[in-house]
Amino acid sequence: MSKIVIVGCGNVGMSYAFSLVTTKNKVDEIVLIDVLKDKAVGEAMDLTHATAYSSNKIKISGGDYSDCENADIVCICAGKNQEVGETRRDLINKNYGVFKSIIDEVKKTKFNGIFLVATNPLDVMTYITKQLSGFDEKKVIGSGTVLDTARLRCLIGDTLNVSPKNIHAYVIGEHGDSEFVPWSNAIIGLNKATDYLTEDDRARLLYDVRNSAYDIINKKGNTSYGIGMCLTKITNAILEDSNEILTVSAYDKENGIYFGMPAIIGKSGIKEVLPLELNDEERDRLNKSIDCIKETLNQINK
Ligand code: NAD
């Protein structure tokens, strides 16, 4: 029996829950928790009705923190979202308080599964989850740059008229304004991406990936479906022990922080972070991205 607890039933939490209901997976039970208890119960009722026509038979309910006890994954999507003109880093102090209240409650149970984090600023919130929970770093996973990597692959696919499934290019670093693409590692089909994409193409693609969230928030106020599907992909990799390589936010011992890197994901969480061979310019960009995350971390008023 696989049980997922989702804390935070807003745009992100519910897009995740809906994609769990509508895609093939091993989930047997979803419990929704929100500070707005009625919202969690109402969402659970609505989603339960969707299961009549979905191939997954999932039990869905609105619950409380005692439901975390035997959960496989507790996914935290709670907290403040970016408003128009706000960066992800601006959310840090509001969301630190939200996480403290949530993780204190989860710790009162015997929860021994995997924490999956979606709230921004993502890499810092993932680090905070590890610190507040005391969990092993491999059992705390952030959605990292999985969404940004999906956006990159869609955009390259559109540019070259190739399926995103045949594009092995990654966005790494902060899930935020300093993220970047190590093009020296990017492969399309069997060849280097740089054989197909000019320097201008690559600069435009990175700009579009970085600005996707701002663009979408300007138009519809939030982003949800993309991240919902990314959380489902990470969930499936865990429940199926599939060893899928995903650019999750993973702990880096050398720097003592979390950031997006390709990692092997399975039942035990982050099984291994795959070191990328970066050229000097890419190494410099990664160091700058790491500095940005450290700077945000230092802004927390505990
Ligand atoms: P939202 O406002 O729609 O939902 C947030 C939910 O959290 C609300 O239902 C609220 O009641 C609940 N909540 C607040 N405090 C709580 C608490 N202490 N305990 C339990 N529930 C609480 O926001 P959203 O659009 O769903 O975004 C959620 C977070 O996800 C934001 O930080 C956003 O920036 C982030 N996000 C991340 C990614 C990513 O790629 N990782 C993508 C999109 C959004």
Image (cartoon, rainbow, N blue to C red):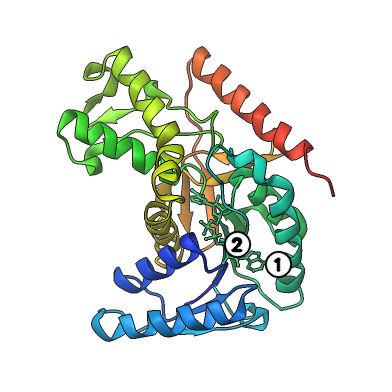
Q: Residues within 10 Å of mark 1 (few under 14, many from 20)?
A: many
In percent of width and height, residue 124 lies at 66, 44
Compare marks 2 and 1 and give the one earlier in the sequence: 2
Report which residue position mark 1 lands on: 102
Q: Residues within 10 Å of mark 2 (few under 14, many from 20)?
A: many
Give the image quarter of residue 135.
bottom right
Q: Which residue sits at x=65%, y=29%?
A: 292
- The amino acid type, in three-letter code, at marker 1 is Ile
**Rendered position, 267 above or below 270:** below
- The secondary structure type at the circle numbered 1 is helix
In percent of width and height, residue 144 lies at 52, 45
In percent of width and height, residue 158 lies at 20, 34
Report which residue position mark 2 lands on: 78
Q: Which residue sits at x=28%, y=86%?
A: 52
| Mark 2 vs 1: CB contact within 8 A | yes
User: Would you say the beta carbon of the disc 1 residue lies within 8 angstroms of ligand 1?
Assistant: yes
